[in-house]
Amino acid sequence: MKISVVTAMHEAARPYLAAAHQSLASQDLPEGWTWEWCIQEDGPGVASAELLPEPRDPRIRIGSSRKGGPAVARTMAVARSTGSLIKVLDADDELTPGALARDIATLETHSHVGWTTSRVLDLMPDGSLIAFEGDPEHGPIACGSVLDHWRQHHRPHVHPATLCVRRDLVTALGGWMALPASEDTGLLTALSVLREGWFISDIGLRYRKHAAQTTAHPDHSKGEEWAARMDIIEARATALARLLLPQGR
């Protein structure tokens, strides 16, 4: 059995890819499981291969496509993947020890659960770690609860950068939303109305903060683009809920 780790790779992430690789290579998986790492270069000239140790691990699969942003790159990575589970790992982030094993164990144990997220620590430029506030309790995340939280706060209460999801759910939704940012939040919010999730209270990711990341852009949290992203994320999830949930939302 296989878990496919998908990574959108762009030039600004080059300084961090080696650390992401080390965090993946050190994962211990349950018996009978292996991983593949589908790196998708977002546009030409990224040259991921030269940042990885030689000889290259055969489980690492590098592809390239026209520049389209992280949503396009991750979706293209899924198209090349072969695992039954899809795990997100941004090129500038780091998995913590045991993260993949905890995702796999949760989804194997709870067949009704479609996806997992986990606790995050922000990795600051000075190397310090800061906890992500507002985590729920360890355990199930009810269908629609991410959407409910989004409606109140315009952010999810679990971190989309830690997402691990069953393959059929990703493909049913067509991958990540075609947005310049918040594409991962859009996918997570839609997933939350399709299937129950699970929050793993162990720390699963070190989320790197740096000036070149998408969330540092001035349009990320205000202005017309921000408002449009917020509206379409909610509208998509609401439409899915009305179509799929007996009670509607």
Image (cartoon, grey):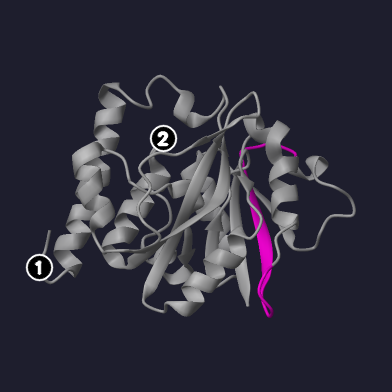
Q: Picture coordinates of residue 54 (x, y %)? A: 89, 50
Q: Which residue is mark 1?
A: 247
Q: Earlier in the sequence, mark 2 or mark 1?
A: 2
Q: Quadrant of the C terminus?
A: bottom left
Magenta span has 34? yes
| Residue 240 part of the magenta segment | no
Residue at the (26%, 24%) spot, across then down:
224
Q: Nearer the viewer, residue 180 or 146?
A: 146
Q: Amino acid at mark 2?
A: Pro
Quadrant of res 183: top left
Percent from the top left, x then y, of residue 33?
66, 75
Label 2: element kind: loop
For residue 24, which quarter of the picture? bottom right
Residue bounds of the magenta highlight: 29-47
Location of mark 2 (residue): 180
Tag of residue 224: none
Is residue 40 or residue 7 the one in the foreground?
7
* Residue 243 located left or right of residue 179: left
Query: Residue, x 48% and y 72% (percent of image)?
Result: 107
198 above or below 51?
Answer: below
Residue 87 seen: yes
Q: Secondary structure at mark 1?
A: loop
